[in-house]
Image (cartoon, helix red, strand yellow):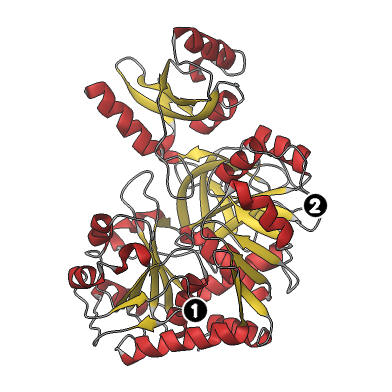
């Protein structure tokens, strides 16, 4: 047992005869007793099949109670939960299986039919399927003994007193994905920090709409709510059509979202404003939220948006805006985290100066699983690769990614600054600004644009966009080229992946 599993057990016991998790897909509630029964049954099946401490359990289940119970069971065994996108094609999942040795695969509907093939690819003799994904009490079935060895993971565990609980890969927007392992202590520290900073209580009811294979939903929504005694209402996926009825009918008090969700809700706003007085706030993270979108949303729906900043390497939350003292455009103040802004020589900078964001804290990793990335950890700080500044009140403003900054003739340009301006133009639905090779300036500022219906990407519109940007930005920041595209590469949470956009534009140019 660890303090994390003790905290989970305590809240399961507190909900013995009370609702704890609801599946919006089936409309059924699980009490604490039902959660414990299903968790213990799964843990027993895993243990009897040979899965133990340190073994990796790959989970490819859709959003729902099954996913959360699989996480609880894996943590209870001190095994390592590796939760992946349940909708990924089988060939993509097969590629992931070569990364590690596995103790078990827990497969949902999209992958269950190929369980034998996938188990063979993973070099394991154990696969677990949810036999009926719509059943109130899912039945987990197991096969023969599991054999799993992970030399790298074993070596990592030897240097930490707390069991490893979660394995995740960063999104890899600026390079190869990096394996992040989070211990029980780090997960608990993060969950406690979130619960405290958001004043979560047993009276809270959160709506889970973000994918559970990402750190945001897994820690901010699930673990923070679990340890604070609140209720989890889980949607299989976000639905703009059903969102406000969910919030009203389920008496949702808060939820963690993303800028893409907020923008969609604003675009599909109902003619009559929903009455959701119990909804204290909506968190926004995973990507920058445009100030004009936040203002328009809050003005129409009368619901505060609390913007925050987090990453897998910090087990989610790093900063968050206080509900009573938010600053639009800022991702808030550090909570439970030491944060400093550093120059290129790793020297701390004063308030207002822009540099790289570096972190230290109980929930922040001190190394990646692969030691070749150890250069990201220097002088006791984790260097995030994000660029920003702190104002005089300690609020953090993010400028962009260090590797995404555009070097135009020696001027370092933030894509986010230009994107925030361009998205205010009525023609633009989405935009990603990148630097493309330029013989004279090194990189030219290029905007890849997805247009709103009714607009045509022609020379007339390009002239209008250039004029619009010129009136609001310094000359060297105005895009020299606008490229009109049908869509922009994005991750599962909706975050635009600038490196993929840039590579796509380069490939188009080369072709």
The residue carrying mark 1 is 72
Label 2, secondary structure: give it: loop
- Against 382, residue 104 (above or below) is below
Please tell me which residue is depicted at 49% across the width and 79% down the height of the picture.
72
Based on the displayed image, in which of its 4 quarters is residue 144 positioned?
A: bottom left
- Against 34, residue 68 (above or below) is above
Based on the displayed image, in which of its 4 quarters is residue 87 positioned?
A: bottom left
Depth check: 172 or 33 in front? 33
- Against 400, residue 73 (above or below) is below
CB contact under 8 Å: marks 1 and 2: no
Please tell me which residue is depicted at 22% across the width and 77% down the height of the picture.
124
The percent position of residue 311, horizontal first and vertical second, equals 50, 55
Side of 73 where 264 appears, left or right: right
The percent position of residue 371, horizontal first and vertical second, equals 30, 63
Depth check: 392 or 330 in front? 330
Instruction: Specify few, some or many for label 1: CA neighbours under 10 Å numbering under 14, 14-19, or 20 or more.
Output: many
Q: Distance between the residues labelled 1 and 2?
A: 34 Å
Based on the displayed image, in which of its 4 quarters is residue 299 positioned?
A: top right
Please tell me which residue is depicted at 42% across the width and 42% down the height of the picture.
490
Label 1, secondary structure: give it: helix
The residue carrying mark 2 is 324
Side of 433 where 144 appears, left or right: left
User: Which badge, 1 or 2, comes first in the chain's sequence?
Assistant: 1
The percent position of residue 196, horizontal first and vertical second, equals 70, 67
Residue 446 appears in the picture as rendered: yes
Total labels: the figure holds: 2
Residue 360 appears in the picture as rendered: no
């Amino acid at each position: 047992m660890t303090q994390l599993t003790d905290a989970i057990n305590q809240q399961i016991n507190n909900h013995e005869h009370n609702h704890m998790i609801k599946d919006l897909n089936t409309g059924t509630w699980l009490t604490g007793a039902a959660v414990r029964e299903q968790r213990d049954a799964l843990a027993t099946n895993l243990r009897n099949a040979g899965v133990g401490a340190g073994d990796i359990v790959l989970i490819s289940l859709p959003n729902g109670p099954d996913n959360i119970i699989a996480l609880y069971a894996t943590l209870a065994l001190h095994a390592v939960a590796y939760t992946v996108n349940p909708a990924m094609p089988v060939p993509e999942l097969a590629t992931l299986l070569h990364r590690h040795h596995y103790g078990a695969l827990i497969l949902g509907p999209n992958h269950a039919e190929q369980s034998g093939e996938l188990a063979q690819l993973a070099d394991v003799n154990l696969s677990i399927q949810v036999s009926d994904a719509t059943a109130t009490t899912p039945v987990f079935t197991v096969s023969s003994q599991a054999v799993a060895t992970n030399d790298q993971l074993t070596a990592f565990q030897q240097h930490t007193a707390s069991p490893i609980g979660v394995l995740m890969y960063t999104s890899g927007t600026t390079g190869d994905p990096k394996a992040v392992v989070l211990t029980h202590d780090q997960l608990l520290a993060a969950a406690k920090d979130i619960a405290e900073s958001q004043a979560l209580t047993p009276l809270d009811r959160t709506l889970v709409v973000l994918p559970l294979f990402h750190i945001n939903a897994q820690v901010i929504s699930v673990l923070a709510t679990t340890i604070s005694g609140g209720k989890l209402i889980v949607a299989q996926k976000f639905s703009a059509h059903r969102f406000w009825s969910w919030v009203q009918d389920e008496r949702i008090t808060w939820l963690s979202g993303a800028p893409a969700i907020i923008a969609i809700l604003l675009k599909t706003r109902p003619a009559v404003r929903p009455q959701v007085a119990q909804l204290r706030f909506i968190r926004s993270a995973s990507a920058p939220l445009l100030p004009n979108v936040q203002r328009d949303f809050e003005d129409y729906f009368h619901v505060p948006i609390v913007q925050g900043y987090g990453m897998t390497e910090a087990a989610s939350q790093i900063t968050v805006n206080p509900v009573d003292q938010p600053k639009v455009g800022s991702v808030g103040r550090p909570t439970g985290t030491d944060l400093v802004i550093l120059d290129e020589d790793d020297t701390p900078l004063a308030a207002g100066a822009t540099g790289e964001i570096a972190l230290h804290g109980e929930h922040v990793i001190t190394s990646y699983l692969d030691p070749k990335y150890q250069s990201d950890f220097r002088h006791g700080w984790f260097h995030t690769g994000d660029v920003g500044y702190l104002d005089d009140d300690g609020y953090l403003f993010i400028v962009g990614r260090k590797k995404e900054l555009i070097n135009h003739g020696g001027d370092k340009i933030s894509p986010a600054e230009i994107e925030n301006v361009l998205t205010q133009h009525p023609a633009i639905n989405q935009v990603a600004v990148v630097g493309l090779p330029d013989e004279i300036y090194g990189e030219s500022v290029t905007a890849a644009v997805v247009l709103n219906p009714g607009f045509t990407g022609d020379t007339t519109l390009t002239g209008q966009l250039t004029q619009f940007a010129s009136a609001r930005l310094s000359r060297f920041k105005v895009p020299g080229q606008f490229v009109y595209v049908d869509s922009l590469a994005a991750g599962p949470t909706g975050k635009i992946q600038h490196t993929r956009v840039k590579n796509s534009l380069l490939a188009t140019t080369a072709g």
